[in-house]
């Protein structure tokens, strides 16, 4: 009986802590929305239709004072079906350019960095339970929502869809010049990325390529 009471008490404390964190972050989001108003980064977002990209192949969608973050189409096509994604819990502070999550597919894995700095407001639990949804339509499946703390500065370093396409083309040309191992497998004969090709690359070459693509 004592053990049960202790377990219940411990569980209650965890739930209270989670809700407290969410309330605090939500309050910060409201304050940020009031401070920034409706005109922040409007010019950039008009072109992007609220969707921006980070060089590490993640997308960012502005939802008033909160941003949703997910994997881009390039990542989805490269790795194919995803078996697991490990994400920090709500309330975790993240720094732009630092590890945000790790993804596993088959016997391979890679990490992607945070496109913005801030505090994680919410994690998409549905994706954690069934990561294969990420492979279906990444833009409709955000992984985390973040309350940014320096978005007006960091947004200038994000890319519009057209800019991101140019960046991807630049990466391809650069890798071809450098002779990255097995790059021919990635782009195939027609120069287009081959779906799920990452699983065909040997592990050492994959680690080198993933580091260059996602870091």
Image (cartoon, rainbow, N blue to C red):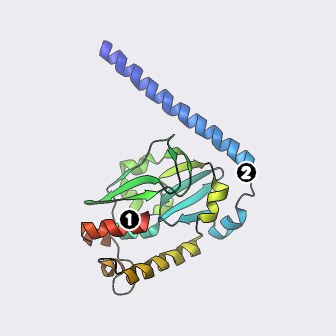
Percent from the top left, x then y, of residue 101?
42, 53
Percent from the top left, x then y, of residue 2?
32, 12
Indicate which disc residue 36 carries: 2
| Dot 1 crowding, Cα within 10 Å, few <14, some 14–19, many 20+ | some
213 or 90, nearer to the observer: 213
Q: Residue at x 30, y 79 (%)?
A: 185
Q: Is residue 98 above or below residue 51?
A: above
Q: Is residue 5 above or below residue 163?
A: above
Q: Quadrant of residue 23?
A: top right
Gap in angstroms between the C-alphas marked 1 and 2: 35 Å
Q: Residue at x 62, y 59 (%)?
A: 154
Q: Is residue 64 above or below residue 176?
A: above
Indicate which disc residue 81 carries: none
Q: Residue at x 45, y 42 (%)?
A: 89
Q: Earlier in the sequence, mark 1 or mark 2?
A: 2
Percent from the top left, x then y, of residue 175?
40, 78
Q: Secondary structure at mark 2?
A: helix
Q: Is residue 208 left or right of residue 215?
A: left
Q: Residue at x 55, y 31 (%)?
A: 20
Considering the image in quadrants, where does the N terminus appear?
A: top left
Indicate which disc residue 211 carries: 1
Q: Nearer the viewer, mark 1 or mark 2?
A: 1
Percent from the top left, x then y, of residue 49?
63, 66
Q: Quadrant of residue 209?
A: bottom left
Q: Quadrant of residue 42?
A: bottom right
Q: Secondary structure at mark 1?
A: helix
Residue at the far bottom in the pictured view = 189
């Amino acid at each position: 009986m004592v053990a049960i009471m202790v377990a219940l008490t411990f569980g209650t404390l965890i739930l209270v802590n989670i809700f407290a964190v969410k309330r605090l972050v939500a309050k910060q989001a409201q304050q940020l929305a009031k401070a920034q108003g409706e005109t922040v980064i409007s010019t950039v977002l008009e072109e992007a239709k609220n969707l921006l990209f980070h060089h590490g192949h993640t997308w960012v969608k502005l939802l008033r004072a909160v941003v949703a973050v997910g994997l881009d189409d390039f990542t989805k096509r490269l790795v194919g079906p995803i078996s697991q994604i490990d994400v920090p819990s709500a309330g975790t502070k993240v720094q732009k350019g630092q590890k945000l999550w790790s993804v596993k597919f088959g016997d391979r894995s890679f990490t992607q960095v945070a496109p913005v700095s801030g505090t994680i407001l919410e994690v998409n639990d549905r994706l954690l339970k069934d990561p294969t949804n990420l492979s279906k339509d990444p833009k409709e499946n955000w992984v985390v929502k973040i309350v940014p703390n320096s978005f007006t500065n960091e947004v200038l370093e994000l890319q519009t869809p057209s800019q991101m396409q140019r960046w991807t083309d630049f990466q391809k040309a650069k890798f071809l010049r450098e002779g990255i191992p097995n790059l021919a497998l990635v782009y195939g004969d027609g120069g287009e990325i081959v779906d799920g090709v990452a699983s065909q690359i040997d592990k050492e070459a994959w680690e080198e390529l993933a580091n260059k693509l996602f870091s």
